[in-house]
Amino acid sequence: MADQPTPPGVTPLVMPPPPPPPHLISPAPVLYAPAVLTTVPRAQDEVMFQNDDALGEEEEEAEEDEADGSLGGSPRQLAVTETLEYEESEESKKARERKEQLVQQLLMHRRASALAVPTNDAAVRIRLRSLQQPITLFGEREMERRDRLRAIMAKLDADGELEKLVQAQEASGDGAVAGQEDAADQAVAEEVPLLQLFYTEGSTELFDARTEILKFSLSRAQSRIESAKRKRADPDEDEDLEFEEALQAMTNTSMDCSEIGDGRPLSACAFSADASLLATSSWTGVAKLWSVPDVKQVGIFKGQHMERVTDVAFHPESCRSLEPSAGNVATASADCKAMLWSLDGKHLQSYEGHLDRLARLAFHPSGAYLGTASYDKTWRLWDVSTGIELLLQEGHSRSVYGIAFQRDGALAASCGMDALTRVWDMRTGKSILALEGHVKPVLGVDFSPNGYHLATGSEDHTCRVWDLRKRRCLYIIPAHSSLVSQVKYEPFGGYFLVTASFDGTARVWSALDFKPIKTLAGHESKLSGVDVAADGTYIATVSHDRTIKLWSHFNE
């Protein structure tokens, strides 16, 4: 077989010659030692064979070097060692440093978790003072101060200085340290003033307004209580049956109409008292008026707000006893102003005084007063006809987002970014309840028509129903998979409540046992507002997808 040329790039291998045939073997034995095959760099392009004698000599030299205790080793060993050394790149160094930092952070976290840190704020201050650290920082809260102490102690523990500090304190005497801590406790207690009740003198207009609210609320409360007693005393009245019929009808709720409301996201919607009109607000700074149930634009309110309109509300007597030329619609805006409009779009009154943008607003049931909630941590009460600010109410530690009035007009509820809902007595101005339970900002609040149930919606994805008589949470509804932007009770009998959420749906819940009745799905984006008609026949929702959707439980 002819020899073939070697392809380019391939190093030829020279194999050892095969042993001769048996008949050619001479009487003297010939030993064939196994050859060691070593490939050298291609520049030399040859294969070297070393027999057992050469290997034996190298092994002997290595043993002699080891016996002599030589540290350098043979030249061959040095060559091999040099070829195994690697040069670390910059990326490898950075990765190694990041790993070491993460390990140090993990160890620091474990040390901090294992440390015993006092829970009393006064004790935390004393410990910080003993560690020669500032006892408080600007804007620092109790839990933040405790976390800072934990971090300082963990760092000292990691540096090995915490034990020295403890030993120094023990050497100085426990009694002296305890006496010093007691003295520091007393000093801190003296620095913190005791909470005291104080009153601020109100204006004559506020006194007159409280008097009118008192008269109005007493007559409304009396009518409500008499109606409830009459229903319970009448054998023909079955409240449970009424609830069942109303909720059964709501299971048939479907979308009646969908209309594009504006070129930018819509922020809120509201029905008129007779449910013949629907008002919407949007981020373009205008509010619009729509007919119900065909949802055709019949009016517009524009030209006054310089920022987006955040909320809209109808006067309680709009489209009933109120003239179209009177103040029927109020709007709130991010320009820190609220405004009053007639149905033909004429601007009638401005309410200025807030220091930050407005969130929600609501008419008092009497129609004579307007409440506004703002990001300046206050809510304010205005005289609708004169535009005078009657009340500037503080009480929230963060922005106030929602406001609602009880049907009787005696109570008001405010909610805000401090995850707190407060109930106020409009006749005295006192905060009579602070409802704590939500773990994130509360964005929606509404009173039930029965007068003693209050619903709140929060960023923690839940809706809570509170019983004002028992002064506690009655039920927690795990309402949505995202924040609850608004909550509304059915105004006629309070048979159900509706929640709107950023998960793109609105849901109907039974007001009797708080079970889900219907999910209103159809929007393509976050729901920002919801409202229920006075007779409970229609539900309106608005969304960031710029559409208005009208829902009802009957289709003729």
Image: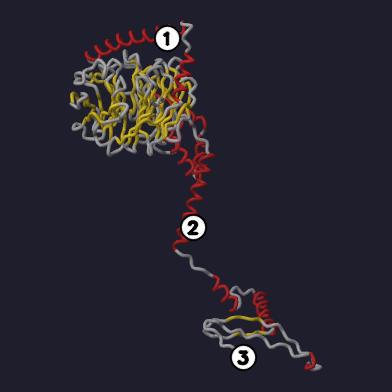
Instruction: Give the alpha-carbon distance from disc 1 to disc 3, as whole Å.
Output: 116 Å
Residue at the right extreme?
27
Q: Is residue 280 above or below residue 69?
A: above
Q: Mark 1 points at which residue?
A: 228
Characterize the local packing of mark 1: few (<14), some (14-19) or many (20 or more) Cα atoms within 10 angstroms: few
Q: Which residue is drawn at 26% across and 19% down?
A: 319
Q: Residue 468: image x %, image y %?
A: 43, 17
Mark 2: which amino acid? Arg
Nearest to the observer: residue 82 or residue 521: 521
**Disc 2 secondary structure class:** helix
The residue under label 3 is 2
Instruction: Say whether disc 3 or disc 2 marks the residue closer to the N-terminus.
Output: 3
Give the CA separation, mark 2 to mark 1.
Answer: 74 Å
Badge nearest the viewer, 2 or 1: 1
- Label 3: which secondary element: loop
Q: Which mark sits nearer the N-terminus, 1 or 3? A: 3
